[in-house]
Image (cartoon, rainbow, N blue to C red):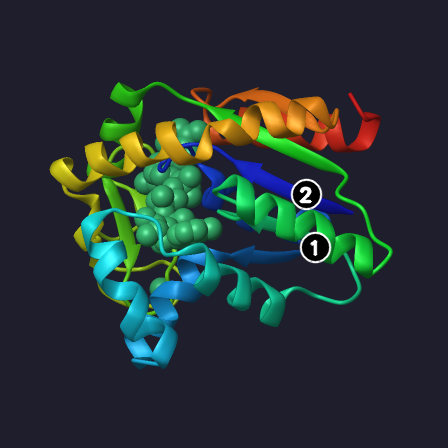
Amino acid sequence: MIVVFLGPPGSGKGTQAKKLSQELNLSHISTGDLLREAVKKQTPLGLKAKEYMDRGELVPDSLMIALIEEVMPKEGGFILDGFPRTVPQALVLEDMLNRHGRNLDKVFLFDLSEEVVVERLSGRLTCSQCGAVYHKKYNPPKQEGICDLCGGKLIQREDDKEEVIRKRYRVYAEQTKPLIEFYQERNKLTRLDAEQDIQEVNRKLLEVLKNGG
Ligand code: ADP
Ligand code: ADP
Ligand code: ZN
């Protein structure tokens, strides 16, 4: 099974991808996590990507396409979390899957208003060591400031400041929203109400993937 999670920043894609990948034994490919790793390690990709990420802009398609070609599993199911984000990326993905005789099963659109996006991202806490994600109010760690999974320090991401959040939302509306129509035309799109709580969104995802509707 190959699934794409589409939606504004902060709509819960990463949270749900982590859960679902364990429940259905799928690989989880988060381009945001891969980029942050590259920045941390100061690889050539990381050095080029950092300035775009800090500004809340998209990393250029050429870099993203090279990255996805490198990490896409040749076999087994996977969830793409945060890719594609532009029409050119979606076209390359389609072509890449075709070449391997594979097919995208479903695209989930995580539907959320800008105001809730800002609330979610201003409260997001990220583990500086393992990347695990929490929320001050909606998904707090057991011990304040400390990751439940690895004991690492929880931080606020540089791009989770209100000004950059608003910028990222605009970038989403301009560059990523056209993918809604792109996947609708291909009959792949399922809309999810991403404002519901974490368990409810997870339940809905499992229901759609098990019953096809
Ligand atoms: P994305 O990967 O789409 O940017 P995240 O999964 O990182 O989104 O979630 C953004 C923030 O919102 C995190 O702090 C997360 O804990 C919180 N969150 C995720 N899903 C929900 C939900 N259904 N209800 C409330 N808060 C949520
Ligand atoms: P969020 O889900 O909170 O928006 P991500 O962790 O998915 O954030 O992405 C963080 C940043 O990484 C984005 O703001 C963007 O700069 C870059 N990025 C991630 N995926 C892509 C992509 N497919 N195309 C271009 N840039 C990307
Ligand atoms: Zn951690």
Judge whether 139 appears above or below 79 on screen: above
Query: Is tag 2's residue or tag 1's residue first in the polypeptide sequence?
Result: 2
Residue that sits furthest to the right in the current view: 101
**At label 1, which amino acid type do we have?**
Leu
Q: On the rendering, which quadrant does ligand 3 occupy?
A: bottom left
SS state under label 1: loop
Closest to the observer, 201 or 149: 201
Give the percent coordinates (x, y) of residue 90: 60, 44
Disc tally is 2
Which quarter of the rendered picture does the C terminus lie within? Answer: top right
Q: Which residue is mark 1?
A: 26
Closest to the observer, 167 or 199: 167
Which residue sits at x=48%, y=40%? 13
Give the percent coordinates (x, y) of residue 8: 40, 32
Q: Is residue 208 left or right of residue 135?
A: right
Q: Which residue is mark 2?
A: 3
